Image (spheres, rainbow, N blue to C red):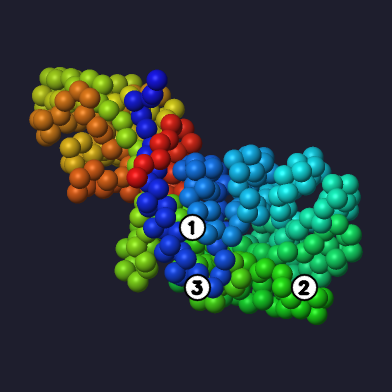
Amino acid sequence: MKSLNRVEISRSALIHNFQKCRQLAGEAAILPLVKADGYGHGMIECARVFASQGAAAFGVAEAIEGVRLREAGITQPVLVLVGVMPQTLADIVIARLTPVVTDASILPPLSRLAGASGIELGVHLKVDAGMGRQGVLPADFSDLVQAVLKAPHLRLDGVMAHFPLADDRQSGNSVEVLRTFQETTAMLADLGCGKCCLHLANSGGLFYVAGARLDMVRPGIALYGYYPDGAAGAAAALQPRLRPVMRYLTRIIQVRRVPAGSGLGYCHLFTTARPSTIAVLPVGYANGYLRNLTAKAEVLIGGRRAPVVGRISMNLTLVDVTDLPETRVGDEVVLLGRQGQAEITADEIAGWMGTINYEVLCLFGQLNARVMVD
Ligand SMILES: *Cc1c(COP(=O)(O)O)cnc(C)c1O
């Protein structure tokens, strides 16, 4: 039994976007970020597609996500970006995940657990080269490296940092972060870690920061078909065109004709000014179609736009289809994505919601049943 709402994930768009990133990355390896259930697109399904295209490794937030990838048969290194904590180390070792270490205190217990399992565990280190969120400051980097080298059952496989402003093409910050990262990691060769994988670029770094590719790149949003700077990035013709991967669809459950002057829904937020035809959709904020889309959003019906009217409620949304007289119960409605020649992008919805495309994708994708298509 299926919900009337569904999120479609396009396999061919995932492959297209991976290949576009591949072209930009040149010789650099690609680590797709599949955290937050693949930005709402399905972590395991997306990881399988990216693995088939040659992804070198994957990035998740918590260890539990990495364990799920292993259970699904993903064999590439899986970097655990947040939550490398005493209580997660055993699972990290058992699942052969790659912890991103931000603090030397975790190294002795991690090494002991790896030794007890009879393995040498690869780790990556995180430098705070300007993000100001996680990792060691450049001044403390050398001590952290030494601590890894001293740990008998650990191996230093990589060093990373993160850009705070790579989506801002005007900012000079990324050049500084790149320089700090390169200066900080320059001493690795002297310590015999010359082969250690250096990586810094998220989608913004890959698209907009010259020289940031290094040994590996870590795109997230670009793989799902959107630019880190939203509509502005999509409009910049110099970029390779990405293809949005997600569509969000529902069906009309009732078409109602109401007279002029009818108050619609909670608070009668909208009152009809003319005799109107109103389509009822079985979707609301419980499905990620947030209440603050009220009085802003539009949807696609028959390849044409229609405005959402009245308060969006938990499971119901009303659409004014007076100007679309062909509208019938059961018609497909597109909330996000293409229908015919028309398209509503996550950037447009993000504009209505006062947020960014990332959040729209996570919400819609994680709160609805998904199907992979084409
Ligand atoms: C999420 C994340 C990325 C990917 O960022 P996008 O802007 O989605 O490309 C890269 N690196 C780290 C450390 C991240 O947490």
Task: State how far apart marks 2 and 1 are (Cα).
Answer: 29 Å
Q: Amino acid at mark 1?
A: Gln
Q: Position of residue 364 (x, y in %)?
A: 43, 38
Task: State how far apart marks 2 and 3 are (Cα).
Answer: 23 Å
Identify which residue is drawn at 31% across, 69% down.
237
Q: Which of the two discs, 1 and 3, labels the residue nearer the N terminus? A: 3
Q: Amino acid at mark 2?
A: Cys
Instruction: Report the mark closest to the observer, 1 or 3.
Output: 1
Any mark on residue 53, and which?
Answer: 1
Left or right of residue 102, residue 304 in this image: left
Q: Position of residue 227 (x, y in %)?
A: 42, 59
Q: Quadrant of residue 243?
A: bottom left
Left or right of residue 85, residue 3 in this image: left
Q: Is residue 164 visible?
A: no
Q: Which residue is mark 2?
A: 193
Q: Residues within 10 Å of mark 2 (few under 14, many from 20)?
A: some
Instruction: Report the mark closest to the observer, 2 or 1.
Output: 1
Q: Which of the two discs, 2 and 1, labels the residue nearer the N terminus? A: 1
